[in-house]
Amino acid sequence: MKYRKKPVVVEAWEFTRKALGDVGSWVRRYQNDIKLVSQYGGEVLYIEIKTLEGTMRAELGDYIIKGVQGEFYPCKPDIFEATYLKVE
C-alpha cells in the first residue's frame, strides 16, 4: 500500500547566523526543549533539541520544526524543502 502525508501546517525556523538574533524570544519560550550551545559563551555552534526520540542536534542551515503535538525536531534543509511548502 502507498500513503500520502496529510497536509499539516507547522511552525519552522531556519537555523542561520542572521536568523539567530530574531529567534531569541522563540528559543527562550521553549527553553525546556531547545538549548543554544556555544563555546566559552561565544558564537552559537549548534542547537540541542529534546525530541520524542531523545536529544538531537541542529547545525547551521538546518530547520527546527514544531510538530502538530508541540514537539520539536531538527530537519536537514534538503529534506525540509522536499517535504514542506511555505504558507503565506
Image (cartoon, rainbow, N blue to C red):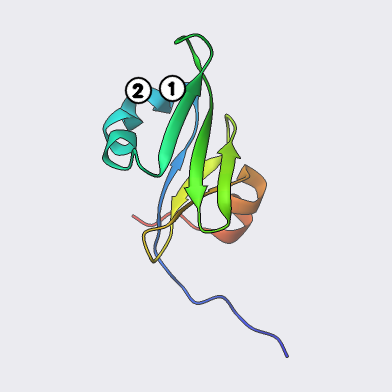
Dot 1: few (<14), some (14–19), or many (≥20) neighbours within 10 Å?
few
Up/down of 44 relative to 48, above or below:
above
Residue flagged by tag 2: what amino acid is it? Gly
Q: Nearer the viewer, residue 73 or 7?
A: 73
* Residue 70 placement: quadrant: bottom left
Q: Which of the numbered marks, if any, corresponds to residue 18?
A: 1
Up/down of 33 relative to 61, above or below:
below
- The residue shown at (63%, 45%) is 76
* Residue 82 placement: quadrant: bottom right
Residue flagged by tag 1: what amino acid is it? Lys
Q: Nearer the viewer, residue 20 or 46?
A: 46
Percent of width and height locating residue 77: 61, 43
Up/down of 2 relative to 27, above or below:
below
Dot 2: few (<14), some (14–19), or many (≥20) neighbours within 10 Å?
few
Q: Give the alpha-carbon distance from disc 2 to disc 1, as whole Å.
A: 7 Å
Q: Is residue 65 left or right of residue 70?
A: right
Secondary structure at numbered mark 2: helix
Image marks 2 and 1: residues in contact by CB distance under 8 Å:
yes
Percent of width and height locating residue 30: 32, 43
Which quadrant of the rendered structure holds the C terminus? bottom left
Q: Nearer the viewer, residue 86 or 74?
A: 74
Q: Which residue is mark 2?
A: 21
Which quadrant of the rendered structure holds the N terminus? bottom right
Percent of width and height locating residue 32: 35, 42
Secondary structure at numbered mark 1: helix
Q: Nearer the viewer, residue 31 or 6?
A: 31
- The residue shown at (52%, 43%) is 63
- The residue shown at (49%, 42%) is 49
